[in-house]
Image (spheres, rainbow, N blue to C red):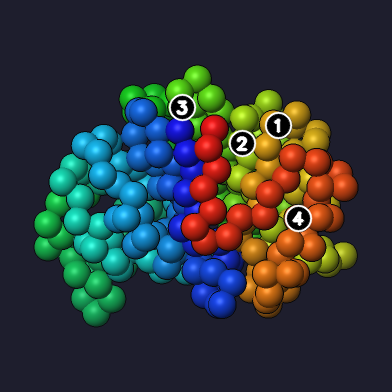
Amino acid sequence: MQIIFLGTNGWYDSATGSTVSALIDSKEAYVILDAGFGLVKAREYIKEDKPVYLFITHFHMDHICGLHAVSRLGLKQPLTIVSHKGLNSMLKTVFNHPYAMPLTDINFNVKTLEVKEGKYDLPIKFECLELDHIDYTFGYRFYLEDKIVSYCSDTKPCANDIKLAQAADVLIHECGYSVRPENDFWGHTDPEGAGEVAKNAGVKKLCLTHFGPNAFDTKAKRLLGEKRAKKIFKNTVAAFDGTIVKI
């Protein structure tokens, strides 16, 4: 199993990366995490006839802007898009004129699944819980190949953050802030905060993504963020577009 980071920026694309998306390539399925502009790069890696799922954390533009290029994936198998309540309404707006072609015009089958907090088996097993962000946001915990991969973006550190990450083989966590503001009404995490979540949850590896493109506008600043997180949780890596993590 491997995780391919397709886009690692929050908010907007920059020289350091596309907006957020990642692909888990497991025996059970291809699992895509969020649909920033990095999403279209998944077509380079989806080669086998396995189920394909796209899990969306929330509906901020940097997490759904890549949906207009879903048709470019050219899938032979159906795509199942999973998120919380409001998914179907959002997709009816986005996949329609004047924004994008309707879902019915895409040359492969697209299914949707709205889920509540809880545990599911699709047949892939996963758990979802609400995170602490300005708008309703889910984090996910996947059980694949007898491993646990957790994905938490966007959020400030919180109880559900740690619960989803508990004893995970890999925690993929946002790092939107370089320095978390005193009054954080948006709900994001800085390198130290992500390191604390990984440490408190007892994960094996922490991968930082969803970097604020203004706060981390160079590769050096992103690597400095990695170094800061490592002081708290040693097995940390800052992801870049194209980073591949094998599990």
* Residue 79 point in image, percent of width and height: 26, 46
The amino acid at mark 1 is Val
Q: Tell me if I can see residue 188 in this picture.
A: no
**For marks 1 and 3 on the same chain, the one whose residue lies earlier in the sequence:** 3
Location of mark 2 (residue): 170
| Gap in angstroms between the C-alphas marked 3 and 4 | 26 Å
**For marks 3 and 4 on the same chain, the one whose residue lies earlier in the sequence:** 3
The amino acid at mark 4 is Glu
Question: For the residue labelled by badge 2, is the local secondary structure a helix, a strand or a loop?
Answer: strand
* Residue 154 point in image, percent of width and height: 62, 55
**For marks 1 and 4 on the same chain, the one whose residue lies earlier in the sequence:** 1
* Residue at (15, 51) in percent of width and height: 108
| Gap in angstroms between the C-alphas marked 3 and 2 | 11 Å
| Gap in angstroms between the C-alphas marked 1 and 4 | 16 Å
Mark 1 Cα shell of 10 Å, populated few (<14), some (14-19), many (≥20): many
In this view, the residue farthest toward the top is 146
The amino acid at mark 2 is Val
Location of mark 1 (residue): 203
Location of mark 4 (residue): 226
Q: Where, by quadrant of the figure, is residue 73 drawn?
A: bottom left
| Gap in angstroms between the C-alphas marked 1 and 2 | 7 Å
| For the residues bearing labels 1 and 2, Cβ distance under 8 angstroms | yes
